[in-house]
Image (tube, rainbow, N blue to C red):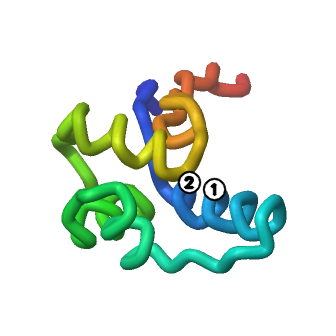
Amino acid sequence: MSSKITTSGRITILLGKHQAATGERVSPRKLAEKAGVPKDFVYRLDSGAARHVDLDALARLCVALNCDLHDILVWEAERAESV
Protein backbone atom coordinates (compact mmCIF):
# COMPACT_ATOMS: atom_id res chain seq x y z
CA MET A 1 0.00 0.00 0.00
CA SER A 2 1.36 3.42 -0.87
CA SER A 3 0.96 6.71 0.97
CA LYS A 4 -1.73 9.03 -0.32
CA ILE A 5 -3.81 12.09 0.41
CA THR A 6 -7.51 11.47 0.91
CA THR A 7 -10.58 13.65 1.34
CA SER A 8 -13.18 10.91 1.56
CA GLY A 9 -15.95 11.75 4.03
CA ARG A 10 -14.18 14.80 5.40
CA ILE A 11 -16.76 17.35 4.22
CA THR A 12 -19.57 15.31 5.81
CA ILE A 13 -17.65 15.22 9.10
CA LEU A 14 -16.98 18.96 9.02
CA LEU A 15 -20.61 19.75 8.20
CA GLY A 16 -21.65 17.59 11.17
CA LYS A 17 -19.24 19.46 13.45
CA HIS A 18 -20.59 22.75 12.13
CA GLN A 19 -24.15 21.67 12.90
CA ALA A 20 -23.19 20.51 16.40
CA ALA A 21 -21.44 23.82 17.13
CA THR A 22 -24.00 26.21 15.63
CA GLY A 23 -27.25 24.26 15.35
CA GLU A 24 -27.34 25.24 11.67
CA ARG A 25 -27.72 22.39 9.19
CA VAL A 26 -25.76 23.07 6.00
CA SER A 27 -25.98 20.77 2.98
CA PRO A 28 -23.02 20.24 0.65
CA ARG A 29 -24.92 22.30 -1.96
CA LYS A 30 -25.40 25.19 0.50
CA LEU A 31 -21.72 24.94 1.50
CA ALA A 32 -20.73 25.26 -2.16
CA GLU A 33 -22.88 28.40 -2.50
CA LYS A 34 -21.48 29.88 0.72
CA ALA A 35 -17.86 29.20 -0.34
CA GLY A 36 -18.38 30.24 -3.96
CA VAL A 37 -17.22 26.93 -5.38
CA PRO A 38 -18.92 24.49 -7.78
CA LYS A 39 -21.18 21.99 -6.00
CA ASP A 40 -19.56 19.19 -8.00
CA PHE A 41 -16.22 20.12 -6.43
CA VAL A 42 -17.66 19.67 -2.92
CA TYR A 43 -19.23 16.32 -3.84
CA ARG A 44 -16.00 15.07 -5.50
CA LEU A 45 -13.97 16.05 -2.43
CA ASP A 46 -16.35 14.33 -0.05
CA SER A 47 -16.48 11.14 -2.12
CA GLY A 48 -12.69 11.05 -2.42
CA ALA A 49 -12.96 11.29 -6.21
CA ALA A 50 -11.16 14.65 -6.60
CA ARG A 51 -7.80 14.16 -8.29
CA HIS A 52 -6.88 17.78 -8.97
CA VAL A 53 -7.77 20.44 -6.44
CA ASP A 54 -8.10 24.17 -7.01
CA LEU A 55 -6.21 25.63 -4.05
CA ASP A 56 -8.25 28.85 -4.06
CA ALA A 57 -11.48 26.82 -3.93
CA LEU A 58 -10.05 24.70 -1.12
CA ALA A 59 -9.12 27.87 0.81
CA ARG A 60 -12.67 29.22 0.37
CA LEU A 61 -14.08 25.95 1.72
CA CYS A 62 -11.79 26.21 4.75
CA VAL A 63 -13.03 29.74 5.43
CA ALA A 64 -16.69 28.70 5.02
CA LEU A 65 -16.20 25.71 7.34
CA ASN A 66 -13.92 27.57 9.76
CA CYS A 67 -11.38 24.77 9.50
CA ASP A 68 -7.78 24.16 8.52
CA LEU A 69 -6.51 22.53 5.35
CA HIS A 70 -5.53 19.36 7.23
CA ASP A 71 -9.17 18.96 8.28
CA ILE A 72 -10.08 18.35 4.61
CA LEU A 73 -6.90 16.82 3.19
CA VAL A 74 -5.72 13.83 5.22
CA TRP A 75 -2.37 12.12 4.65
CA GLU A 76 -2.62 8.35 4.89
CA ALA A 77 0.90 7.09 5.47
CA GLU A 78 2.06 3.80 4.05
CA ARG A 79 1.66 1.00 6.56
CA ALA A 80 4.28 -1.69 6.99
CA GLU A 81 3.15 -5.17 6.04
CA SER A 82 2.86 -7.64 8.93
CA VAL A 83 5.13 -10.65 8.56
Q: Position of residue 65 (x, y in %)?
A: 55, 50
Q: Is residue 31 above or below residue 53?
A: below
Q: Quadrant of residue 47?
A: bottom left
> As rendered, which of 7 and 25 lies closer to the eye?
25
Q: Residues within 10 Å of mark 1 (few under 14, many from 20)?
A: some
- Residue 10 shows which numbered tag? 2
Q: In this view of the protein, which residue sits in the foreground, 75 or 82?
A: 75
Where does the image place residue 19, in percent across and percent down from the top left?
A: 73, 69
Mark 1–mark 2 contact, CB under 8 Å? yes
Q: Quadrant of the C terminus?
A: top right
Amino acid type, residue under disc 1 in the picture: Leu
Amino acid beneath label 2: Arg
Question: Whole-percent x and y of residue 4?
Answer: 41, 31
At a point 47% along the width and 36% down the height, the residue shown is 73
Mark 1 or 2: the one toward you = 1
Estimate the spatial distance between the alpha carbons at disc 1 and disc 2, rounded to whole Å.
6 Å
- Left or right for 23, reference 9: right
The number of callouts visible is 2
Residue in the picture at 77% in, 65% down: 22
Query: On the picture, is 82 further left or further right than 20?
Result: left
Q: Secondary structure at mark 1?
A: helix
In this rendering, position of residue 11 left or right of residue 22: left
Q: Is residue 57 above or below residue 10?
A: above
The one of 62 and 42 positioned closer to us in this rendering: 62
What crowding class fits label 2: few (fewer than 14 Cα within 10 Å), some (14-19), or many (20 or more)?
Answer: some
Label at residue 74 = none
Secondary structure state at the residue bearing disc 2: helix
- Image quadrant where residue 77 sits: top right
Q: Position of residue 44 (x, y in %)?
A: 30, 63
Q: Is residue 27 above or below residue 11?
A: below
Q: Disc 1 marks which residue? A: 14
Q: Residue at x 42, y 76 (%)?
A: 30
